[in-house]
Image: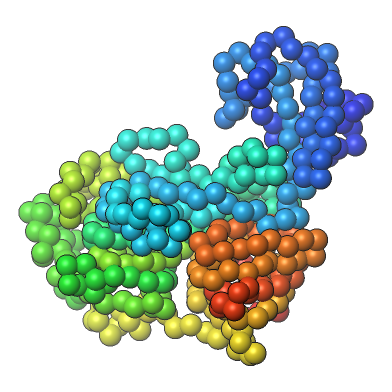
Amino acid sequence: MEYYNEASKNVPHLCRWRVPNWCSGGEHISRLVETPLMKLIFSTNEKINFELGRYKQDRRIRVIWMKFDDLSRYPLKLKQNRVRRPFVGGNLLDEWQGKKNSEDGNMPEEWVSSTIEARNTSYIPNEGLSRVEIYTGEIIFLRDIIASDPVSFLGEKHVAKHGDNISVLVKILDSYSRLMIQVHPDNAFAKKVFNSDFGKTEAWYIIGGRKVNGDDPYVLLGFKPGITREKWKRLFEKQDIKGMEDALHKFTVKPGDIFFVEGGVPHAVGTGCFLMEIQEPTDFTIRTEKTSPIGLPISELQMHQNAGFDKMFDCFHYNGFTREEVLGKWHITHQVVKDESGSKLSWIISPQYTTYFSIMGIETVKSFTTPRAQTFSSVVVISGKGRLLWDGGELAINQSDELFLPVGIGDINWESCGGQKLVAVRCFPPAGTAAGIT
């Protein structure tokens, strides 16, 4: 909704509004507050019609328009965003985030630049949504900042194809227990069964790990030859977990390994993995275990996502591969773009490999400049500390920091501090990349 009066007629894009906590029915105040990052515009003594949308609160009728377009010129630092999952982990994630009392528990995932809610058996409103603390101290959902002016944050080309959906989700995951054997829908299944424009093709970038009960970190990926729908369904009905595990290939993993996981391909992250996951922006997961590896009962919703037990088996692609074929098809090698003077720029997942997403790796012991991107991106600082400098400002960054970079930010200088190597990853949406980098 847009509304203009004499005080606000020169202020464009007033299309996101909220109801303040301190307002009660009947209040009418007129004033304009201008700041470098936001303009709060209070309504005049005119009767106006409006909808409270997702900010509906009681009978409060006062409206504040919040101008977010100024924020599109700055990196947005995201709040930490831990999410519940039906497996145990998080100790390495706690340590990485600098928490004093690290431990494994039921919040083993960190969601980065997330504009979607988590699908868990017990619903918690807004769980999974990334938040930004702006300079006023107010905490706002990234989803709502973007929705205020999608073109300024995401770019015209992206908005023309995807609207205000950022079309990608990044996670940091730490597993103590094995995740359940599962599959995610490809786009065709997601559209037909879930009425979603996105499936859940994903990729894993291993950043660390630990031994669990003497076992090295590992993943399960891809059917071995000879697995049919009938055989797979029979293993499920018998709950033959060992049989299901043996039907998939097992690979030990180490830091730097990269695996691509297409929608429809069965898989499971094993014990001891500390990894980054980049994926399509949904939380559709078909699980084949009625009890988790740690003994938790799994609900029907968590297994078939309301698709039904029979239809869920249509989600799997029953293509068998040898171990060598799986590695050749889905194990990815870094592509170094530049390596000079203590700085390295590489494609962890290049836009030439897949159109779903891409990841750029940045390492420097001094400073390094990347050119203006053609679209927005998300940044995770893997290790080290330093500064991010752009035309108009700078920002101190440290290990585990998460940033959303709007499309309007130009060249970026990555500068390490304290003699430490600064290591960061920059995640791009579909067909997104940096100008001049191939």
Q: Residue furthest bottom?
A: 340
Say which residue appears at 38% left-offset and 77% top-offset. Answer: 255
Q: Residue furthest top?
A: 26
Q: Is residue 150 above or below residue 206?
A: above
- Viewer-side residue, 149 vs 62: 62
- Viewer-side residue, 88 vs 259: 88
Disc tally is 0
Can residue 250 be seen in the rendering of this structure? yes
Say which residue appears at 63% left-offset and 49% top-offset. Answer: 163
Q: Position of residue 155 (x, y in %)?
A: 71, 57
> Which quadrant would residue 120 be assigned to in this image?
top left
Q: Is residue 391 above or below residue 163?
A: below
Tell me which colouring the rendered structure shows. Answer: rainbow
- The quadrant in which the C terminus is found is bottom right
Q: Position of residue 231 (x, y in %)?
A: 13, 62
Can residue 1 be seen in the rendering of this structure? no
Say which residue appears at 61% left-offset and 84% top-offset. Answer: 343
| Left or right, residue 143 beside residue 240 | right
Q: Position of residue 331 (x, y in %)?
A: 37, 79
Say which residue appears at 68% left-offset and 66% top-offset. Answer: 388
- The quadrant in which the N terminus is found is top right
> Which quadrant would residue 173 be assigned to in this image?
bottom left
Q: Position of residue 234 (x, y in %)?
A: 10, 57
| Left or right, residue 170 beside residue 414 | left
| Left or right, residue 332 beside residue 35 | left
> Which quadrant would residue 258 be assigned to in this image?
bottom left
- Viewer-side residue, 154 vs 232: 154
